[in-house]
Image (cartoon, rainbow, N blue to C red):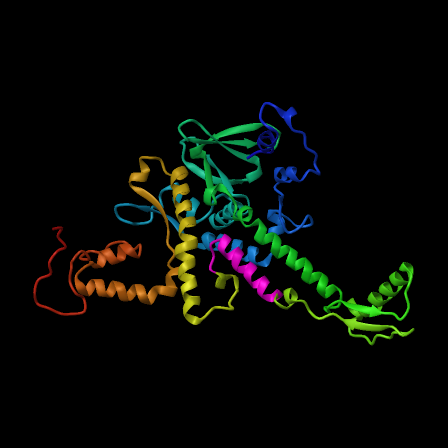
Amino acid sequence: MSFATRLARFVGRGAPERKSITLTDPGALALFGVLPSASGPTVTVTAQSAMRVPAVRRAVSLIAEAVATLPFKAYAAETREPAKDHPAYGLVHDWASDWQSAEELREQLTLDALLTGHGFAQVARNAEGKPVYLLRMQPSAVSVETDDSGEPSYRVKLADGGEAVLAYHDVLHIQATGGVSPIVHAREAIALTLAAEQHLSGFFKNGGRPSGVIRHPRILKPSAKEKISASWFQENSGDQSGKTAILDEGMEFQEIALKLADAEFSEVRREQVREIARAFNVPPALLYETSRATWSNFEQSHRDFLTGTLRPWIARWQAAYARVLLTPDERARLYVEATPDDLLSVEFAARATAFSQYRSMGVMTANEVRSALNRRPLPGGDVLQNPFTTTSAPAQPDEES
């Protein structure tokens, strides 16, 4: 959404005189991508400030890098052979342009979608209408418009100040769930984490010690209190922490016991990591929050990451690639698919056991197993025969009842 559109929605389209705002008005923060939080006026959440939270950075990079490194390919639907002669194959598997690989573009657009809600790339075509490269566009420069039928078009701000409108089949569009960044929905959890970091930073800045009280036998003037306080912090905090303190004039230092909230501060920080994990739909163990991890559930976390986190992103990328790189006629005989074989290695033994049982039961043929593994069929692979037994009976073809 463009700045002008957001401004118009805020002040009221067609009647800007109804409401005036200033740049210091808290309500104007959303116009600039700044999300105020309930954690205090000093804590605001933006894509940049959120990435300073290690849990957010880990969740974002984990998803973006996993999607980027998956091998996407264009296949022929009938033979399941890679369609290397089609331009889409090179754009999704090798290079998106002469200067950017397909992996780099996927990572950048997924990052854009996670941080801003949307990722865009323009499709450049040759004189024959075939795609030749994909060029990333800044999300802030693109606004999505739809007609009465729901067909989208994209209004793009150009570098020279002009605008261009691109059709839906000329823009590779990846968006987060609902077109809203997880950072927007989780801004309070992220803000609380930032506030906790500030608190911890101040705690250690003051020597990593609880506060205390200096008792003086006489009533002091405010100026004298300030001098004593300043002298104490100068001599016994920061780099000077741990030095021997000397008090005169009968003064005594009484240390204040650690508060319950401070004593449980570590648990508060762990819970914030879990909250951020929920917002990004990532298992907490993969954000290195392993306080409740075991060998069994850590392996399950990798399976959950594939099925619950990556599957939706893979489906979005496959659909987006097919929409802009394949014509409606080509979609009937070609498709784009990612093969997460490396990610499936954690459950490879279980899958192999299941396929083995299906073969021995006569439920699946060899080619059906190969199809599930995204492998091309082999001659003689359509026979329902138990490969673990030998028999002189002729093999029977797989017939539909």
Which quadrant is the N terminus positioned in? top right
324 is higher (above) or lower (below) than 110: above
- Identify the residue at image location x=49%, y=40%: 121
Residue bounds of the magenta highlight: 265-283
Residue nearest the observer in this picture, 151 or 202? 202
Image-based side of 379 in relation to 192, left or right: left
Is 232 in the magenta?
no
> Magenta stretch: dominant SS?
helix
Q: Position of residue 289 (x, y in %)?
A: 52, 64
Q: Position of residue 197 (x, y in %)?
A: 65, 59
Is 280 in the magenta?
yes
- Identify the residue at image location x=33%, y=44%: 335
Q: Position of residue 169 (x, y in %)?
A: 42, 34
Q: Quadrant of residue 85?
A: top left
Residue nearest the observer in this picture, 214 or 380? 214
Image-based side of 138 in relation to 230, left or right: left
- Identify the residue at image location x=64%, y=38%: 27
Q: Position of residue 292 (x, y in %)?
A: 48, 68
- Identify the residue at image location x=56%, y=28%: 163
